[in-house]
Structure formats: C-alpha cells, structure tokens
Image: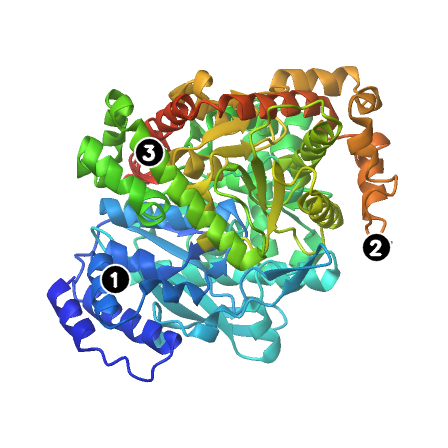
Amino acid sequence: MNKEQFVTKLKQLDISGKSTIELYNEISAFAMSCGLNNVEKPAIKNAYYLSMEFLIGRSFYNNLMELGVLKETKEILAEKGIDINVFEEIEDAALGNGGLGRLAACFLDSAAGLGLPLQGYGIRYKYGLFKQAIENGFQVELPDDWQRFGDPWSIRRDDEKRLIEFADMKVYAVPYDYPVFGKRINRLRLFQAEGSPEAEKISEYLYPADDTAEGKILRLRQEYFFSAAAIRELIEEHIKKYGKSFEKFPEFNVIQLNDTHPVLAIAEFIRILTSEHKVIFSDALEIAKKTFAYTNHTILPEALECWNAELLKKILPNIYAILIKIHLKQREEFAKLNCTSEEIAAMSSYSPNGFSMANLAVYVGKTVNGVAKLHTEILKNSLFKTVYKYYPDKFQNKTNGITQRRWLMLCNNEFSSLLDKAIGNGWRTDISELNKLNRVISDYTEDFILIKEEKKRQLFDYIKHQEGIDIPQNFLAFSQAKRLHEYKRQLMTAFAILEIYNGLKDGSIKDFVPSVFIFGAKSAPGYKRAKGIIKFINEIAEKVNADNQTNSLLKVVFIRNYNVSYAEKIVAGTDVSLQVSTAGLEASGTGNMKFMMNGAVTCGTMDGANIEIVELAGRENNYIFGAEVDEIECLKKDGYDPNTYIKLHKKAVESLIDGTFNDDGTGYFKELYDSLTIGASWHNPDNYFVLYDLKDYVEVLLKINGDYKNKYDFAVKQLRNSANSAYFSSDRTIKEYAKDIWEI
C-alpha cells in the first residue's frame, strides 16, 4: 500500500458537516484505493474455501491495521477533533452464525498474512444473522440490515455475473469482491442473487428456518446457488488459461469444503465436466477426487445434512442424476473391496432417507479432516469408522486456530505493547515467538495485572453503556460467550450461579470474591429450548442483580446482540473462560483460544481444543472438571438416571417449575425441566449430562474464586496460557492446510 498517499488524503479530508457514516465511507474508500494499488502476481495454484458463512466482523479497524495505517488514522482524526472510536457505531457484517463463519474469516486473514493464495466463496446476504433484542427476558429477532451504513469494502463485478439454473427458476449470481489484505491481497467473493423477487430471496437471509417445506427448498437453493457459481467460475478460468485439459485441473486448483453446506459443489463440478464438456463420468469423478477436500465441524446429526431425494429431483434434476451415478459408482467400488452390506450402507451417499452430504464429501474428498485431536479420533473411530477402515489415508487432523491480528493485536493493544516490551515485536510476524514469554513471566506479572484491570474496566464500561448494568471494577469476570445450544450447557452455568447465589444467601459460602458471570449467545430462531434457556438466564440475572443482600458479591449479565465487536472486548477483559460442553460434542471451539491468547484461564471439560489447551499451558494453570468421553460413553451404555443427582441441586433445578421464575406462560421452563428428568421421544433424560457434572462444576468455580484472592499467582496462570497460545494461531493451521492438503 502507498502509505504516504493515504496519509496525505486523510490529512486533506474535509470533515465539516459530515456524519460519522459519511466519514466512515470516505476513509474506507481512501484505504481501498491505496491498498489495491499493488498488483498481485497470479499464483500458479490457488486454494478456494467454500463456506456458507464468513463472520468477518467490523472491517474498518481491522483493515486499517492490516494496511499499516491504523495508528496514523487515529492521530490525524484526533487532530481534527474526532475520536476514532466513533466508528464503533458501524455494526458488523454478520454473515455468519458462530465459530464456523468466524473460522473461515480467520483463515482468510492468516492466508493473506502469510502470503498464501487462498480465496473465499460464499453468499452476500442482504440481512446477516439476526439482530438480537431482549424483551422481558426473551430473545426477539430483528432484521440485521448491515448494508444501511454502505459497503465501502467491496467491489461489485457486474461483468462477471453468472446464470444459475434450477428446474423452476433462473437466477443471476452477481459477485462482490472483498479484498483481504496482508502480505498478498487475496479475495473473498460473495454472490448476491438477482432476477425475479423469488430469485432474490436466495441471498436475503442467512440460514432461513428449514422446519417447513418452503424453508428446506430455500436452504437447498442457497447451498447450490453459491457452490454452482463458484464452480462454474473456476472451470471457466481454467479453460481460459489451460484449455480443456481438465486432468490438469487439480494441479492448479484445490477446493476446501467448509462443512456439508457446499458439498453440492462436487456434483456440479462433475455435471459441468460431463454434460457441457463431454468428459467421461468416471474421469470426471477421478478429477473431483483429486480436487476436493472436506472439513467436518461436528458429529451432531442435525448438522450432517441429508437431502430428500424427491426434493432434489424436483428442484435440481440434473444434480439428482449425477448423485445417483456417484451412488452407483460407490457401490461398485465398495463391492470390489468386499465390504459387507452393513458397511456399504454406512458409507453410501444415498439411502432411503435421501442423500448424505457428509458421506458424499468423505467419499469424493481427497482428505477429510477434523478440527481438534479428540474430534478427529471420534471421526475415525465412530462417525466415519467404516470409511476409516477402508480409506485410512484420507483422514487428517487440523486443529482450529484464530488470527492473532484481530484477536490480540487489534482487540488488546495494551497487552500487545507489553509483549513488545517483554519479548520484542517479532511475535507480530512470527507468532511462535510468543513462547518466549514463558522465560520472563515473573518480570511482567505486575504489569499484566494492571493491563487486565484496564481491559476489564473497558469491558465493564461498555456493558454499562449497552446493558445498563453497573459492575464494580474489583469483580472477577467469568464469561461464556458462544452460540446457545444445549450441548454447550449454558443451562449448567445458570444452575451453578443459582447454587452460588443460594449459598451466599444462606451463609454456607463465605469469603467470596465478588464475581460477575457474563453470557453472550444467540439462539437459532426456531430452537425453543435454547430460547427457554435465554429466558431462564435473564430471569436469574434480574433476581440476582436486584438482591441487595448479595449483589455486591454476585452479578449476572446476558449481553444483547453478541457479535464479533462485542467479543473483541469480552475476550480481552475476561479472567475465566467457561468452556463446559459435554465431553465429545464440541468439535474444537475457537472462543477458548481467543480467551487463552488474551490471558484468561480455561474452566472447562476435556472436550474439543480444551484438551490441547491443557496439554500446552498445563493442567495446573487451568481448571478442568466433569466426565470425560469414556465415562460419558459408559453412562450411555450402562444407563444413567439424572434423578439420582437432582437431590444434590434440588432448589436450583426445581426453580424451573416451583414458581421462583416466570416464563410468562410459554411452558419453556417446564419443558426444560422435563428434558432433564424424563427426556423426550427423541432423547433420554438429561441427554447432555448437565446434572451429572453440576456438582463438580460448582466446586471448581468456588476453587477459582478462592485462588483469585492471590492475584499475583492467578495472573501467572493467565500469562502461562497466553505464552503457550501460539499453537492456536490460524497461521499455524493454515500452514498445515497449505502443506498437507492444498500443496500451495
């Protein structure tokens, strides 16, 4: 970037009479024009990342930092009487739901930072993930019209739009390019659906509710729409450069499928090669097997998409035909391996239930990777056990990571400056140098304590401004910030808070360090139990915060509209990261890594990346509790009666039904209680072992509270976590993908 050119333009900027949004768009346009001056040398081989979600977060501060002008912008604006923080009113482009989309954004950031050619493909949703309001404790979803501020960081490419055809409609996929700045400028290309009003619905909302036939059709259209647009573009580009030598396609292109949403890209790739370019089907399939790679993010059945065959045949008849051909080829291949009928059924992409996108991705993908060591072992030994038996070389582990540029340098400038002082600034370009901090922790512990207090003050001030809740500076901060799901067990944290509250009330808990529990979470709009948990937490917060007997010791905050920008403040200001999923169900997690890098201890189960956090930072520097995977499996096998454990927590658990809290007649709380005590037609009682782990959880929370009294020793634990967090940089993850899968 021509830094001098940008600085000159910014100094000449006339601010008189301009709104914050006008200034935001002008400064962003300056940065774009200067940043795009550099012409990239085309890469010989590119990797392409297809993802339904890209949770980018606010672009303004991050891009100015990546372009090396954030400091100058802050200073020049200050000279003009403007605090750069005014642009925080420009909200995030929330084009993702949670960890999946944030991981995709981190990967693009790291690849650009490392100079690796990775390009992203997704959907330019008109409305991102809903804006969450809380009314009377209930989640209310509002449209997130993120484009109302303008969109200065993207470039519309009308001349590159492509026609995508369904059986009953045609739609144009119009690309918008978001440059990703780093050592090289990569591109995130998001497609907007245009044409008829019906066609435009395809890119209107992220994840339309799919509990109706209409919703399922729209979801199917979305997944095919962006996958087909990307594949058509890549094939056309290949023909321009290399002609119809499609056997060479994998030499120049590799396509990473981020979960099952883009897996229809495989069928579209084979369809175009066979129907439009007359490639023999078996040859097209072999080319696909060398081109595609698949990342699995979950073992939860509801996320392993299975498309109804009749629906596919109705909406995408040509894709249906290709999928049937793949199925027949599979059966032929499996028969040659002498697979049993049960094994064939376990691996087949087609069954009476429909088409399994996961099985299709595993069959065609040249590699299949999990996103943490434990998760990958579960894939090999359980979910894809049969595939692993016959195709063991397909499987790899690629533990997730986060970009330190956003999640440390940008969100925690104070700690970043301390690191520069302690170990030099080499860690900013080579994150592995963060390990040097281990050698000098004792020299900088007091400084770190002051910085953590400052970041906590900033967080508490922001909470006061946003939520109207006043948290004194001396409070110990626990945070559970993630998507609301039963397996993530926010409900268990709610019960634990009630146990502590009741103990403070009756005097059985003494000498308690003042503490605040901070929740950040959105529930899927149709997920009634998750919405019930949100209401329950807000009822608890209202009761606890209003109790003058205890509110000088205990507070609860459920933040509204949790997003990337809020997360930047939470991870920097938190003391204790709550990562309490049922063992074996959290594939990895990335929030745990963000907290760790910013110097928070982990209070969690041995699940996902928590295991690797403990391996690297030491169990003695974290707080691990609860049943592990083997124990959970034994409980499932031998029988588990949660009612045995209710008597240990009777007051907290029965507060759901005894009138302590009010769900306004929705029945949410009774249904939550029943889910724990009698189960439902589709699951056993306490399916996520909340009551089984609750006693251990309360005990470990009280131990943390006691340990925090020695702030120095606690800060050493926090610094040990930060010092050993380099492994969880997405730079490391991307280097592994580039070497082991993409060969770029």
Which of the colour schemes (rainbow, by chain, secondary structure, one colour) is used? rainbow
Q: Please, what secondary structure does the residue beneath circle 3 have?
A: helix
Q: Which quadrant of the view contains residue 32?
A: bottom left
Foreground residue among 699 and 546 = 546
Name which of mark 3 and mark 1 comes first in the sequence: 1
Above or below residue 273? Residue 632 is: above
Q: Please, what secondary structure does the residue beneath circle 1 have?
A: helix
* Residue 606 visible (yes or no): no
Left or right placement of residue 667 versus residue 133 in this view: right
Q: Please, what secondary structure does the residue beneath circle 2 have?
A: loop
Categorize mark 3 by other alpha carbons within 10 Å: few (<14), some (14-19), many (20+): many
Foreground residue among 96 and 580 = 580
Foreground residue among 709 and 155 = 709
* Residue that label 2 marks: 664
Residue 468: % across, % down? 58, 57
| Amino acid type of the residue tagged 3 in the rendering | Phe
**Which dot marks residue 448?**
3
Measured Cα–Cα span from mark 2 to mark 1: 48 Å
Categorize mark 2 by other alpha carbons within 10 Å: few (<14), some (14-19), many (20+): few
* Residue that label 1 marks: 74
Left or right placement of residue 354 versus residue 595 in this view: right
Categorize mark 1 by other alpha carbons within 10 Å: few (<14), some (14-19), many (20+): some
Between circles 3 and 1, the one closer to the viewer is 3
Q: Which quadrant of the view contains residue 242?
A: bottom left
